[in-house]
Amino acid sequence: MIVDEFIENPKMLSDFANQKKDWSNFLTLLHLLLVKHGERKFHLASTSKRHSKNLRDLADKLELEWKVVSGTELFEYQKQVTPLPQIVIDAFGNKINGRNTHGLVIAKDENDLDSLEGSVFSDSNTGKILEYPDCCVNWFVNNTSSDWEELYAFVIEQSPEGANTPVENIIQLMDKCDGHVPETRNRIKKIRVNHIAESRDTMPFIFFQPCDVCLISASFSPARKLNEKYANFAKENYPQLYEIIISEGKKEADNYLNPEFREKFW
Ligand SMILES: [Zn+2]
């Protein structure tokens, strides 16, 4: 009943959704059902006003427990092609590590919610909480680390003092120009096509971006296996939801393949 109603009248449940795109809303419902049936332990979402109440209401309807859990942030960085100087790594660490953050956690058992209180909500740890494959989580962390390195190189190139720019100024400049580095934009455009469009099309039952290995190899692909597990659960228990996640996933894939959409996204 709850599922039929939701398919009829979907609500905003995810950061990925917008007025015209419901794939992530349907997938969130499926993931809450996976939690309810003991197939996953947690669902974790931001506390964004846009969807938080809808998510709590749906959790209540499904008789799941929820809690806004406090945790801390971490500057998570893995050296890539052109490593950041240690002084910059330390400055970001000082700025970000231990900073308070919150997450809306949904689980079947109230005690499980408490177990996440005080967690470090880094990308790696969030990936662990959400049972994402290690290979895909590492790939994501490596990518965000490349973002930092490209941003640093860009800022140093623009700054009249170059590599001698005081570290406080470097951090300030890096904060300001996030999203404007051409190299990063080009890399992310490729990720949108090769990883996001591809996974919405062939793995629409997972939220995370699959890594290179998971995309290429069909036989050794933790992401494809996880997708299959969630897909089978949906097909067996909620066939209508199964169908709509596939069809909405294909629409999302088409969007990501549309150059106009990709340009607008920036
Ligand atoms: Zn992977």
Image (cartoon, rainbow, N blue to C red):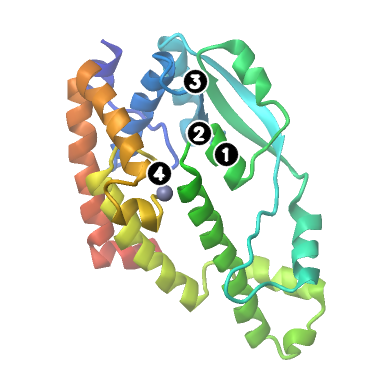
Q: Earlier in the sequence, mark 1 or mark 3?
A: 3
Locate residue 132 relative to residue 216 in the image: left or right: right
Residue 69 in percent (x, y) is at 65, 27
Q: CA distance from mark 1 to mark 4?
A: 17 Å
Q: Earlier in the sequence, mark 2 or mark 3?
A: 3
- Alpha-carbon span between mark 1 and mark 3: 20 Å
Q: Is any atom of residue 250 visible in this view?
A: yes
Three-letter code for the amino acid on which mark 4 is drawn: Phe
Q: Nearer the viewer, residue 37 or 56?
A: 37
Q: CA distance from mark 2 to mark 3?
A: 18 Å
Q: Which mark is residue 126?
A: 1
Quarter of the rendering containing residue 156: bottom right
Which residue is tagged 3?
56
Which mark's residue is nearer the viewer, 1 or 4?
Answer: 1
Q: Quadrant of residue 109?
A: top right
Ligand 1 within 8 Å, label 2 CB: no
